Structure formats: C-alpha cells, structure tokens
Image (cartoon, helix red, strand yellow):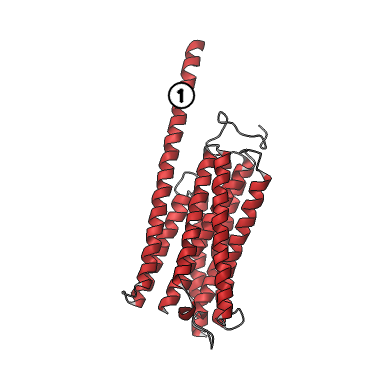
Amino acid sequence: MADHHKTTEPTVHRHEEIQRKLALKEERKHHNVSFVMMILLTIVAFFAIWSDKISDSFAVIFILTLAVVQVFFQLYIWMHLSHKGHDFPIWGMASGVLVAAITVASLMGMIWTS
Amino acid sequence: MNAGERLTDANFPAHPEKATLEGKNKFVGFWLFLGGETVLFATLFGTYLGLRNMHLDGPSGEELFSLPLVFLATMLLLTSSLTSVYAVLSLKQNKVRSLQGWFIVTLLLGLGFLGLEIYEFIHYVHEGHTFTSSAFGSAFYTLVGFHGGHVLFGILWISTLLARNWNRGITLANAPKYYLFALYWHFVDVVWVFIFTVVYLMGKVG
C-alpha cells in the first residue's frame, strides 16, 4: 500500500503540472490573438476616419461599435473576466457601466437643452 | 506558511493572487474600485461630449488633432497592455525575472505614451488651445489630462512595486499586488480606447 502510494503520487503531480502548462500555453495564445484583433480594430477605426470615404454619421456609429468590441477583448481576455470566480467583478463592472451610460446621457442632455 | 516567504515551484498555488484572504479582499475591492472609476470617467466623457463644439475663437478639435500622433500613442499603450498580461503569465509560472522584465517594458512604453501626451499638450498651448481658452479646452484637458494622470500614477506604482520587491521573488504577499497593477493598467488602456474614439476620431468628423 505504501509502495503503491509512492509510485502514484509523483505521476499525479506531474500530470497536473502538464495540464497547468497546457492551460497557460492556451491562455498565452488567447492573449496573442486578442492583441492582433485589437490592433486590427484600431487600424480599421483610424482608417475609417482617415480615408474620409464613409459618411460622418455612419463613421461615428461604426467606430463606437469597434471601441465597444475592443473593450470586451480587454475585459474578458486580458483582465480575465472569462475565468472562473469572476461573478462579483462582472456585476461590479456591469453596474459601473450602467451608471456610466446614464451619466453620459444625462450630462449631454442637460448641456444641450440648457 | 508565512505570506512573505518566497514561493517555490513545489508549493506554488494555482492562483497565488487569491491564495490568502487579504489577496481575495484586494481582488474584490479592486474590481469595485474599477466600477467606480468607470462612473468617474463617464462624468468627464459626458461633459466633454456636451461641450466639445464650444471652442469660441480658439481652434476646434478638427483643426488641432493630429491622427498619426494619436495612432502612435494608441499603439504604445496597447502594446504595454499586452506586456503587462505577459508579466501576469510569468507570475502564474513563478518566473520572477521574466515578470520583472515584462513590467519594465510596460513601464517604458507607458513613459513613451506620457512623453507623447506632454509634447501634444505643449503643442496645443502654442496653438492657443488652453485650459481656460474655452469650454472645449477645459473639458478636453480635464478628460485627457485625468487619463494621463492615471498613466503617471501607474508608472509610479509599478516602479515602487518593482523596486520594493526586487530581491523577494514571488510571495503570497506580493502576488496580489502585481496582479492588481496589471488590472489597473488594462483599465487605463480601456479608457484610452474610448478617448481615441470619442475625442480624437469623432473630433475629426465634427
């Protein structure tokens, strides 16, 4: 029994370690992919304005959408919101964003109507 | 185990940043802080959006802003966000030297960003766009300057954190601190994404 214990424990440990390494490798890949995506989104946003080829009102909606997508990459992949145990942070940020949206809308409204 | 003790590969926990109660509290508290920061920046964005066309006799955003400069600054900050996430990956592998290296790269990119912003502001002041020149000027410098202040604070934070823990390795006491700095730095980049979109790009289309 004792012998059995000695032989299995290191293998279990090594198995866990390999899994952890693989998970980290996967995570690094996600980080690299999201970096490339964010660079592309930035270039597209700048190009949309720079080239002056699309109408202004559409360009504004377009670049705002790109910004929101890019922020999702930041929050979910780089700030690990997609990982386990992030329920509270998600609620915290979601309520922050909700209050922020109301704040922006009401401030703009107040200044415009005054 | 003493939280200040250098961790070895054998006793390294899967989540060193949340292995102690203090680490867990810092993690939750910091996210709450970031939620509050979101609201804080929203007030500045809302004010800017309302006042951005009120430039009186001074130059308008369309005349002032130079997109190549903003693009370069964006790339610097975006890359620094990537290097800080690499530092967190090193943290998870107990590689303290690589963590320090990536955070130093982050620090240098942050300094580059700040240098560009200072250059930009000096240029604008020469063009007649100052804090007191118009409502647009006040709103612009408050919003963009407040973000620049966050970058400066981050630079000071990571410098002192690295210097203080240079020879300590990764411990249960300093792992949450490194981790939270990376979160803060990503958040600063998140705010910048909206600044380059709302202030600079939307400023160009009027």
Horizontal side, residue A28 vs residue A103: left or right: left
Q: Nearer the viewer, residue B30 or B167?
A: B167
Q: Is residue B150 above or below residue A24?
A: below
Secondary structure at numbered mark 1: helix
> Which residue extends farthest bottom?
B57
User: How many residues crowd around disc 1 within 10 Å: few (fewer than 14), some, or many (20 or more)?
Assistant: few
Horizontal side, residue A43 vs residue B138: left or right: left
Q: How many marks?
A: 1
Q: Is residue B136 above or below residue B116?
A: below
Residue at image coords 50%, 79%: B52
Residue at image coords 36%, 64%: A44
Whether residue A84 appears in this view of the structure is yes
Q: Is residue B83 above or below residue A10?
A: below
Mark 1 is on which residue type?
Val
**Quadrant of the drawing holding the C terminus of chain B:** bottom left
Q: Give how far across and how far down residue B201 sits, in percent.
A: 43, 72
- Residue at numbered disc 1: A12
Q: Give how far across and how far down residue B126 sits, in percent.
A: 58, 80
Q: Give how far across and how far down residue A22 sits, in percent.
A: 42, 36
Give me the chain letter of mark 1.
A
Whether residue A1 appears in this view of the structure is no
**Quadrant of the drawing holding the N terminus of chain B:** top right
Residue at image coords 51%, 57%: A93
Q: Nearer the viewer, residue B148 or A79?
A: B148
Q: Give how far across and how far down residue B79 sits, in percent.
A: 48, 55
Kindly indicate the quadrant of the structure image that contains residue B21. Answer: top right
